[in-house]
Amino acid sequence: MNKVTSKQPVNPDPSATISFQQPFQDASELDAYVRQAARNMIQQAIDLEVQEFLDAHAGRVDAQGRRYVVRNGHLPERQFLVAAGPVQVRQPRVRDTSPNREDRVVFNPKLLPRYLRRSKAVDEMIPWLYLKGISTSDFPIALQSIFGESVKSMGDNTVVRLKEKWTAEYEAWNKRDLRGKNYVYFWVDGIHVNVRLEEQADKNQCILVIMGATADGQKELVAVADGYRESEASWTAVLQDLKHRGLEVNPKLAVGDGALGFWAALRKSMPATKEQRCWFHKTANVLDWMPKCLKGKAKHAIHEIWMSPTKAKAEKAIAFFQATYEAKYPKAVECLLKDRDELMAFYDFPAEHWVHLRTGNPIESSFSTIRLRHRKTKGSGSRRTSLAMMFKLAESASKTWKRLKDYEKLEFVAKGCTFKDGELQQDVA
């Protein structure tokens, strides 16, 4: 006769089964306590899940009232990795003795799926460590120092499988449908890296990246592609690919460094999009033509231009800079004036968004981790692997991207409303 087990109360307090009289002597004792507490809580949760499954099928009985679905010992002990370290648990075995095989039910645990070896937190930590600079050869040591001897075999193979997975994810993402997408702003950048993107190493290869702001103020990664230098042809291919995949609405403004071939490509592919040069890069370019003793004063003068509350005052600040430095440093003044209109484009957009639009900082700061990772990379990588890594780095960085300030104003921008010195000039109704 199958014995019917009664439901056992689950004690949520792990310390109920762990007792200690003396303070912890060192960190290892504390780690052991934490792992034991985690083991007890997980074991209790597994037992509860099994019991709930048995209770759900308590009505399945034979003619004598004996249950068909019962516990039948335990499965072999399993070890898996959680944030607290490696833990061992035993899952009760569940058996359905119904005479009709087709009616039998199978217990599929949700907490511990059959092939689970690591918790989600650990799975997310492994690519994070790699993307932040831990090399493949250093993985066993790094993981062993965190989780102990039991995970010393993890590392090389794990990263290889991750790279294959990232490549598949990138290729799927790079073919996604963009129909219905409406990006109000673009930030663009070209990132030069020290890995091979083609079969023949070429120092002129770089990664072309576009970040966009949607009409609800959310920043999104729009494109990650490889190109030759930052040429017009390479950027044209990126923009045309976006349009080919369904991007019909052109952004209202694009922000980037003035040296990019992006601008020539933008004028051909998205002629209605306004151009905003990055003041951070422009300041650095102008100061390159100034002597060291004057750079501090000149930088303050440039700062007065882009921080002016109105376009008219910004023009006066430009005139002052020109009158002050043109005689002795004409190259510096020429560098400032050649992109004059493009430097002032942000005045035609909401003042609340100026902090996002005057510089390329939204994309520059986000992709600083990419440059860090590639400084850590040794040797060359294939084109597909490098692009996949870039994509995952950008995806990781996107988790920290903040919504645009006063994003409600984007609705007016998207509708084509007129702004002057950051103020709305017409009734949107």
Image (spheres, grey):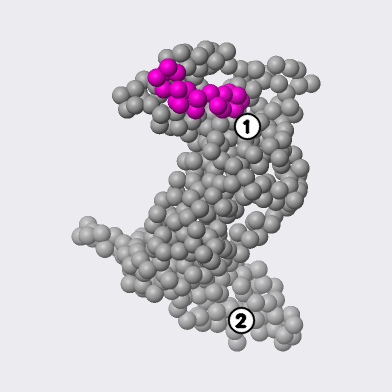
Give coordinates of residue 43: x percent, y percent. Answer: 46, 68
Q: Which mark is residue 275?
A: 1
Give coordinates of residue 378: x percent, y percent. Answer: 39, 62
Q: Residue at x 70, y 80 (%)?
A: 104
Amino acid carrying mark 2 in the image? Arg
Q: Residue at x 49, y 43 (%)?
A: 366
Circles 1 and 2, Cβ within 8 Å, touching? The answer is no
Q: Which residue is the extreme one toward the right?
A: 429
Confirm whether the magenta stretch covers residue 191.
no
State which quarter of the image contains the C terminus.
top right
Q: Earlier in the sequence, mark 1 or mark 2?
A: 2
State which quarter of the image contains the N terminus.
bottom right
Q: Look at mark 2 in the image and give the residue it sits on.
A: 95
Task: Indicate the secondary structure of the residue bearing disc 1.
Answer: strand
Q: Residue at x 50, y 48 (%)?
A: 191
Q: Nearer the viewer, residue 111 or 86?
A: 86
Tell me if residue 405 can be seen: no
Residue segment shown in magenta: 325-345
Q: Residue at x 73, y 17 (%)?
A: 426
Q: Quadrant of residue 186?
A: top right
Confirm whether the magenta stretch covers residue 336.
yes
Give the main secondary structure, helix, strand or loop, of the magenta stretch.
helix
Residue 397, compared with residue 100, is above or below; it is above
Q: Quadrant of residue 100?
A: bottom right
Q: Nearer the viewer, residue 112 or 13?
A: 112
Q: Is residue 147 left or right of residue 359?
A: left
**Tag 1: Cα neighbours inside 10 Å, few (<14), some, or many (≥20)?**
many
